[in-house]
Image (cartoon, helix red, strand yellow):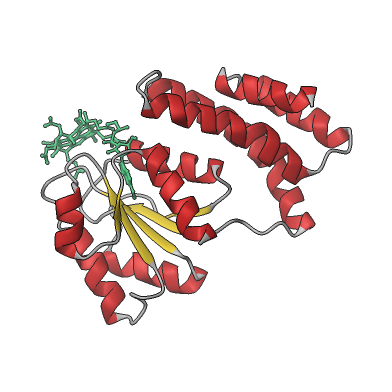
């Protein structure tokens, strides 16, 4: 379909205004919101994710594309709720306690949303207990923690322990990431998944939710 391809192209170019206009046109033409999301916006964001992973594009391009994606999803969100389209899964996301870095976390959020997941973003400086409360309340499949400091990455262990204490450890997948994080660290604190970048974090989250 021409317009869906145009939406994908404009999203990749980061042209938020054009994406918004094209999405509105598709809605006015009677196209289903889910079709616009899954065959227009998401393929565009997936291409951005792949290019980012291969270092063919960098953070600014991803942020600009994400802004374009948001311009489209804002128009679709109320229609998707009306249509009763369920999200593919729920993720509680945040940067851990003591840590104020959020650029990487925001990329993770965008990539996950691009995969059709619902992301509840708790922001920065998030206490372990707040991740757990949100996961319980939202019945989320995944808790996703970001940390950029060697001094705050230990907070991720507190999240794993809080999930155990709350009796929800078997119900949630705990995913971690951020510059100082490694597979060995992930294993040492008993978290489930470590991913080095936003695109592979989103892919892994989508896999968990579809399993
Ligand atoms: Co800060 N900072 N900073 N900083 N800062 C670093 C992290 C640092 C490495 C710089 C340095 O010294 N070379 C260093 C940490 C050293 C360490 O702990 N080993 C550092 C420091 C020391 C500090 C302060 C302590 C400085 C000070 O005040 N003395 C202070 C701490 C504040 C705090 O958090 N309490 C501080 C403050 C800041 C700013 C506020 C100025 C700003 C943050 C602004 C913001 O985020 N809104 C900032 C910035 C920008 C950086 C650098 C320069 C860039 C970080 C960034 O956004 N990268 C950084 C140096 C560097 O990394 N080159 C640095 C781009 C981003 C896309 O990458 O976040 O790694 P990143 O995310 C990646 C992956 O890690 C991954 O996906 C993303 C992309 O694909 N990922 C995940 C991230 N989260 C994930 C979660 C997942 C999966 C993947 O699953 C859940």
- Total marks shown come to 0
Identified at 36% across, 70% down, the residue is: 132
State the image quarter where residue 29 is shown: top right
Residue 194 seen in render: yes
Quarter of the image where the N terminus is located:
top right
State the image quarter where residue 142 is shown: bottom left
Classify residue 107 as left or right of residue 179: right
Identified at 33% across, 75% down, the residue is: 169
Viewer-nearest residue: 114 or 78: 114
Image quarter where ligand 1 lies: top left
Identified at 54% across, 52% down, the residue is: 117
The image shows residue 173, relative to residue 162, as above or below, that is: above
Furthest residue toward left: 151
Residue 90 seen in render: no
Classify residue 18 as left or right of residue 99: right
Identified at 87% across, 34% down, the residue is: 28
């Amino acid at each position: 379909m021409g317009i869906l391809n145009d939406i994908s192209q404009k999203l990749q170019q980061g042209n938020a205004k054009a994406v918004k206009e094209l999405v509105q046109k598709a809605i006015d033409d009677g196209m289903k919101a889910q079709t616009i999301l899954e065959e227009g916006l998401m393929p565009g964001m997936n291409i951005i994710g792949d290019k980012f992973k291969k270092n063919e594009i960098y953070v600014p391009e991803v942020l600009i594309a994400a802004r374009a994606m948001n311009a489209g999803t804002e128009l679709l969100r109320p229609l998707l709720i009306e249509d009763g389209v369920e999200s593919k899964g729920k993720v509680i996301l945040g940067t851990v306690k003591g840590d104020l870095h959020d650029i990487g976390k925001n990329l993770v959020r965008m990539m996950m949303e691009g995969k059709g997941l619902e992301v509840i973003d708790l922001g920065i400086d998030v206490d372990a207990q707040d991740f757990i409360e949100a996961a319980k309340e939202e019945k989320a499949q995944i808790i996703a923690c970001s940390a950029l400091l060697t001094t705050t990455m230990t907070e991720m262990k507190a999240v794993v322990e809080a999930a155990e204490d709350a009796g929800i450890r078997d119900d949630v997948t705990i995913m971690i990431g951020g510059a100082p994080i490694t597979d060995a660290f992930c294993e040492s604190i008993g978290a489930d998944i470590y991913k080095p970048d936003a695109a592979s974090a989103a892919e892994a989250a989508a896999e968990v939710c579809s399993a």
